[in-house]
Image: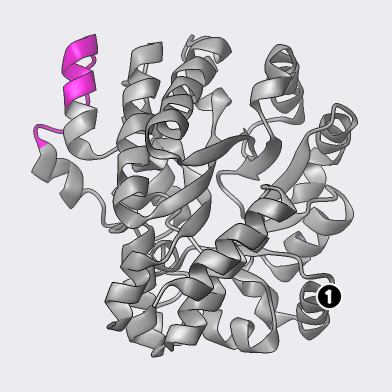
Amino acid sequence: MTRNELIAALPKAELHIHIEGTFEPELMFEIARRNGVKIPYANVDEVRAAYDFHNLQSFLDIYYAGAAVLLYERDFYDLTRAYLLRCREDNVTHTEIFFDPQTHTARGVAFETVLNGIERACREAQEKWGISSCLIMCFLRHLSEESAFETLAQALPFRDKITAVGLDSSEVGHPPAKFKRVFAKAREHGFLAVAHAGEEGPPQYVYEALDLLKVTRIDHGVRSAEDDALMHRLVELQIPLTVCPLSNLKLKVVNDLSRHNLRHMLQRGVLVTVNSDDPAYFGGYVNQNFIELAEALDLSNDDIRILCKNSFKASFISDAEKKAWYRHIDETV
């Protein structure tokens, strides 16, 4: 079995995926027409041409413009179902999906509309294809603490449908400390906690996410490698990093995948995982991230198996489910 064949054959979990970032241009235009919403692009090619980002903010500007066409429960269902079909193609058997309520409630879309569309597609994927999932509600860090508290309050009636809270959007200038009280309140209500840190922001942001937000998983975290004490802590406590290679390349976090530090972190014993982040914008879903990273870093088949096991180890599924997937990975030859 070739390396790429192994990547395709192995089951994997995806732990860093923004559902709004799976919005392929074709579906964006279809929903825009259906809803009578004008978007600032004449055709699919113009949208793809606009995907020439130079940093996180330039990406987010286009990301939010695309999300503006999502208005009804059917739209969020269609968006999520399209992603879950890609999971089926890539042998992603479990996914933990980020969604950004504030992106939509600020436009007058009800929280319930967003959640119900996403959750219905996830429920159907479990029933039809055996793909399990859970939802992670993210606070937009460029908005206020007050706005985050309002979003948390909106989520409480649907507590049983949301596993964790997260923190995303523009990292630089918006440290995790800004949301310490919101995360404390969320944890009181039983939510698990994760946060984006150490993508464009410094290692200090990773420390804040761990010490102030009390997260159990760091999203991105690649700049942790700049701080040896932090790396030691990540290894000792086996705190997962949900790394997104093609995202890092597209947003200029790294200039070349061959210079990505994932293999270095893997060799040091950091619990790193491979994810696609915003695949419609960054050029590839999970398997494509594995393929291009494996080629650039010359990853071995053993490395790939470890990364797939890590994806389940870092997930929120039960220990029994994790062990079953480990066996499945070991038995795939």
Tell how many labels.
1
Q: Residues within 10 Å of mark 1 (few under 14, many from 20)?
A: few
Q: Amino acid at mark 1?
A: Arg
| 162 or 327, nearer to the observer | 327
Residue visible at 71% across and 48% down in the picture: 318
Residue visible at 50% across and 16% down in the picture: 116
Q: Image quadrant for the C terminus?
A: bottom left
Q: Which of the 4 image quarters holds residue 262?
A: bottom right
Q: Position of residue 134 (x, y in %)?
A: 59, 36
Q: Which residues are magenta?
A: 30-43
Q: Position of residue 110 (x, y in %)?
A: 53, 9
Residue visible at 31% across and 21% down in the picture: 69
Residue visible at 51% across and 46% down in the picture: 95
| 220 or 205, nearer to the observer | 220
Above/below status of 157 relative to 280? above
Q: Position of residue 83 (x, y in %)?
A: 35, 40
Label 1, on which residue? 233
153 left or right of 257 in image? right
Q: Position of residue 3 (x, y in %)?
A: 32, 81
Q: Which of the 4 image quarters holds residue 250?
A: bottom left
| 194 or 135, nearer to the observer | 135
